[in-house]
Image (cartoon, rainbow, N blue to C red):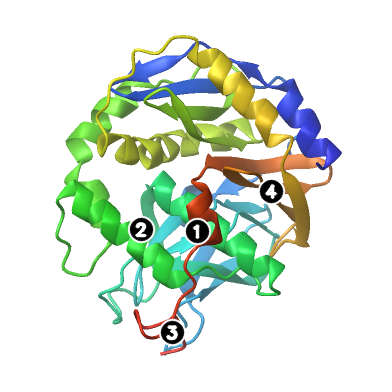
Amino acid sequence: MNKTVKSMLEDFDLGALQKHENLQVCPLLYSGNHSPEYLTLKEALEQRVLVVKELMKEGSVPELLVKNKSDSPVLLLDGEELMGAKQNRVLNTTILLKEKSKTVIPVSCTEQGRWSYSSPLFADSNVVAASRVRASKLSSVSQLLRSGEHFRSDQNEVWESVEDLASEAGVSSPTGAMKDIFESRQKELAEYLDKFPIIERQRGLIFLNDGKVTGMDYISYEPAFKLLHQKLIKSYALDAMMSKKLSGKKGLKKVAQDFLKKTETCQEKKYQSVGYGWDHRYDGDDLVGSALVYNNTVIHMAFFSIDKSEKIGRMSSSSRRRDYRIL
């Protein structure tokens, strides 16, 4: 494992466990101050220094064009959703956009039933894809990277994950939009947000559902983490709502500690990132992960527990659904 990533995993302190219903959160605490400063997607859009649009007028499902007009880098988080234009999309990987740059970014569709302009530009949907969608997508992106693809996902698998989530939530969306599932559960999500406050030195979270770790996220720049905290809570809370098993298990902090140690046993490959730094990909027996490393700093890191049967994934085929393509 990359020494910068390994050192970060070993330097975390774990905060007191927070709990609501069947979701437990263990805050990741870090005292280092080595992170570069950067804007989040939400900040950059609100300041009108970021423009996100279709790659071409006709659109290209797996790609978007982003212009960063700021003098600061901008963080686009893996799984973060953009809404508008011809259909809603999520980021296939975490990208630290360079200052004053134009970048073609890899994305996946999360609104299967629409291919027409609702707006000329994209906006922040205020959603990070549900954790199961992120885990499945991360696994397929890593698999395709090993095959020589450039941060592409198995688009059909993403659609299937969104469809399964909608079915479990009892949501019928006119366009199959993932965002509609989140909006249908706003009241319940607000209850989860109230139960998981940010604490001092926190820059990440480990999530446990029914006493088992489902995943973790870490963000290097504390102001950015504070802005992304609620998005991440909603990402995992939505999945937790679908399985309301209440855990009576004890010693969950030890479970979180063991998960961090387990990540260090993963196999690793690295790839040049779309923006700044290197994209490190991790593969273990029953977990997958990624870390964006720039100037010896882990900018973002995420790991997910995943069933072995899900790791291989089902590659897209035209016989099952239309594949992504230029339309």
Q: CA distance from mark 1 to mark 4?
A: 14 Å
- Name the secondary structure under disc 3: loop
- Marks 1 and 2, Cα distance to the nearest angstrom? 9 Å
Q: Amino acid at mark 4?
A: Tyr
Quadrant of the image containing the C terminus: bottom left
Question: Alpha-carbon neighbours of circle 3 within 10 Å: few (<14), some, or many (≥20)?
Answer: many
> Between disc 3 and disc 4, whose residue precedes?
3
Residue at point 34% right, 79% down?
Answer: 320
Q: Quadrant of the N terminus?
A: top right
> 10 Å neighbourhood of mark 4: few (<14), some, or many (≥20)?
many
First along the sequence among labels 1 and 3: 3
Q: Amino acid at mark 1?
A: Lys
Q: First in sequence, mark 2 or 4: give its number.
A: 2
Residue 59 is labelled as 3
Mark 1 lies on residue: 137
Q: Is residue 48 left or right of residue 178?
A: right
Q: Are marks 2 and 4 in contact (CB under 8 Å)?
A: no
1 and 2 marks in contact (CB < 8 Å): yes
Crowd rating for badge 2 (residues with CA inside 10 Å; few <14, some 14–19, many 20+): many
Q: What amino acid type is highlighted by mark number 3?
A: Gly
